[in-house]
Amino acid sequence: MTARLRRAAVFDMDGTLVDNMRFHTRAWVALAERLGIAVEPSVFEHEFAGKKNDEILPALLGHELPRETLDVLAEEKESTYRALYRPRLEPLPGLLELMDDLERAGVALAVATAAPPGNRALVLEGLGLTPRFAKVIGSEHAPRGKPAPDIYLAAARELGLEPAACLAFEDAVNGVLAARAAGMRCVGVLTTTTEAALREAGASLVVRDFTQIPRELDALWPRL
């Protein structure tokens, strides 16, 4: 691969590869209600988006949790989410065609997501995408969830590239902030929040879905 082609596209998963965030929100709200906690859905959709369960649950309950309790509650939420979303599983429009175009252009593909292994398997294996990604970076690779840059820095490191050679695709403000803090240009996808919010966070391009990605892919990367 030539130096010109040493580039990568790093995709967030939830809300980016698939339009599933409302199912996560429903699962979080159900858990909160069972625990007797009243939380507006928008808190999960915006404030907690991109964070790790290890970060969300203590914030939700207002105190730290023993590891065993945290694991049990996290699995309850994720099991509910998977049951809700599994029958609706499908890629965001234009995703597969964009991946084809990127691969033809010699661009490496990766995923950077705070989703736990079971959720990654649901989407990536369920859609047959796992073999197409050179790296799948999860919460276990990053000490902090988004908006910290850890997971995107880990993706660049695993790919053997500088962050500036990587283009991130994100749906959430926290994700855009994380990508930008890592030194990556970012494309925002309008499944979760507004164009204004994504641009304010630092997205250089905002699209409804992947059918709106420019066909001239070189224009998406800064000159390397």
Image (cartoon, helix red, strand yellow):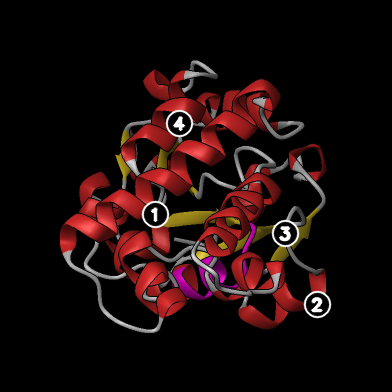
Q: Earlier in the sequence, mark 4 or mark 2?
A: 4
**Mark 1 closeness class: few <14, some 14–19, many ≥20 residues within 10 Å:** many
Q: Is residue 127 above or below residue 91?
A: above
Amino acid type at circle 4 is Gly
> Which residue position holds label 2?
196
Is residue 22 left or right of 143 when viewed as pictured? right
Magenta stretch in the rendered image: 171-178
For label 3, the SS is: loop
Determine if the magenta segment contains residue 121. Answer: no
Q: Which mark is residue 106?
A: 4
> Which residue position holds label 1?
114
- Looking at the rendered image, the disc whose residue lies closer to the viewer, 4 or 1, is 1
Q: Which mark is residue 192?
A: 3
Kindly identify the residue that appears in the image at 49 percent across and 15 percent down.
128
Q: Nearer the viewer, residue 70 or 116?
A: 70
Kindly identify the residue that appears in the image at 60 percent across and 67 percent down.
44
Marks 1 and 2, how far apart at CA:
24 Å
For label 2, the SS is: helix
Provide residue 136's location: percent of width, then percent of height. 33, 39
Amino acid type at circle 2 is Ala
